[in-house]
Image (spheres, rainbow, N blue to C red):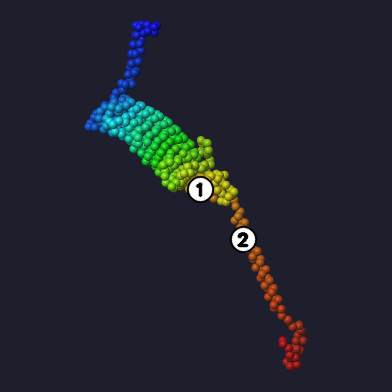
Amino acid sequence: MRNIRNLKDPTAVVLLWLLWLLCWPRMGTATTLPKVGCTEHDTTITCDCNNDEQPMVLPQLHGAVFQVVIRNCRDLTVEPNALDNTEGLRKISFKQLQRLVLQQNALSVPRDASNKALIVDFEDVNFQLIASHAISGNIEEISFTRGRIEQMHPFGFTTIKDTAILLKLDGVTIQRIESQAFKKFAVEKLIISNCNFVGNLPTRAFYELEVSSELAMHNNQFQEVHSHAFSFKLISKLSLSENRFAAVDGEWLEAYIKDAITLRGNRFGATSEIAFRSLGVHRDYQLSERLELRFHNNTVQSLPPGGKVPGVAAQPLRFDERFALSIRQLRYENVWSCEQLDMTVQPPQPHAEFFRQHSEQLMFRAVANEPQVVPAPFVPLRQLIAEQCQKPSYTAYIVAGSVLLALLVLLLLLLLWWWLAQQRRRRKLDVVQPEPRTYKETQIVYQIENAGLLKTDL
């Protein structure tokens, strides 16, 4: 009762009126932003800010319309349910917006008979904020071309049409997207190309997505990509080409592939040995031969197990054994350590099976004896082992000495045989020689022979 009496007090009433008057201007500022002027021509509504410097808000759109074009805005806010009162809307385009804020349910398209599946196109748009559930509903295609995304909250892009046709990001600079920013939707084709992810990509940034046709990531720049940042329930064809990653932590890419997978020409810095272990074969794959995983012309800098700083020695990469792994020209930015070899066998072989199986296609820089201005070229691991990891061997010297000794023995045997042969020949020529005579005795013998009194054989 005391509180009721206080409310009837004129002083209390005056105070309430004063508080209301003080708060009213502040409460009204959120709704007093000027609205963009929109003109209608045939089935197209064009909302043009004419590069006005002051912040503006998109008005609620009404009626039957096929296309909406919003352009030339310096600072624009799209409030919740801006499209709820439209009928037959097929496409909405945002062009040349320097600052755009999409509030919750800003582009939420209801699924009813009066609305077609929507095509959303952002061209040269800088997003200040994409709030949670800002883009959802009956959306068939959505593309971001150039521009920038400063911040994207969780569930910023969520469940859309049962199976959308296209989600495309081309030439976009992405400052920060939070975990589960892209969550639980199915799309036929997902293309991310020429984008620069300035901030680190958190876990589950792309979460529980299905790509029924193709996921293509080409020529993108990433900073650190955290474990399970990309998580896909299904990808029919996966293609990663010419991307650059400062670091990939743990199993950064989780995906189950149905038809084809190719990773070509990428550069992975600070790469965990289990970075690609969560790539698997989808249960709907029915062919008898194993699905080929093409890992061609990539560069990695491997991390030690459990480490954050790139180690000195290279580490083997792990892949699902259900893939038929095809490795070509895999370049390691690590130094090869001869301690990773089994020296009990000849020639020495790496302990890790991955290095043994692909020694012709794993490339390491040759270790130079002297400092070089230009980095040493990459050489195959097998060649590097043969040139730098073989123990000094004296086999050649032993063989050469043995050969020379054998030749010397053979020469001695030949000499011995020649000497014996000469001795045999001399024994056969043993001739009886006449007894020695003096000169006078010889003359007497000649005279007797001449007289015919003595006959001799001499």
Label 1 with label 2: CB-CB less than 8 Å = no
Three-letter residue code for mark 1: Gln
* Mark 1: secondary structure: helix
* Mark 2: secondary structure: helix
Q: Residue furthest left?
A: 42
Residue 124 drawn at (x, y percent): 33, 33
Three-letter residue code for mark 2: Val
Query: How dense is the environment of label 2, judged by Cα within 10 Å: few (below 14), some, or many (20 and up)?
Result: few
Q: Which mark is residue 357?
A: 1
Q: Earlier in the sequence, mark 1 or mark 2?
A: 1
Residue at the spot 71% in from the left edge and 76% down from the top edge: 427
Q: Nearer the viewer, residue 200 or 68?
A: 68
Residue at the spot 42% in from the left edge and 43% down from the top edge: 285
Residue at the spot 75% in from the left edge and 89% down from the top edge: 445
Drawn side of residue 379 relative to residue 452, left or right? left
Residue 186 drawn at (x, y percent): 37, 36
Residue at the spot 75% in from the left edge and 86% down from the top edge: 442
Q: Quadrant of the C terminus?
A: bottom right
Q: Nearer the viewer, residue 455 or 56?
A: 56
Query: How dense is the environment of label 1, judged by Cα within 10 Å: few (below 14), some, or many (20 and up)?
Result: few
Say which residue label 2 marks. Answer: 403
Q: Is residue 168 visible?
A: no
Residue 165 drawn at (x, y percent): 34, 38
- The relative height of residue 136 versus residue 288 in the rendered view (above or below) is above
Q: Is residue 382 visible?
A: yes
Q: Quadrant of the N terminus?
A: top left
Image quadrant in which you'd find residue 52: top left
- The relative height of residue 57 versus residue 313 in the rendered view (above or below) is above
Measured Cα–Cα span from mark 1 to mark 2: 38 Å
Q: Which mark is residue 65?
A: none
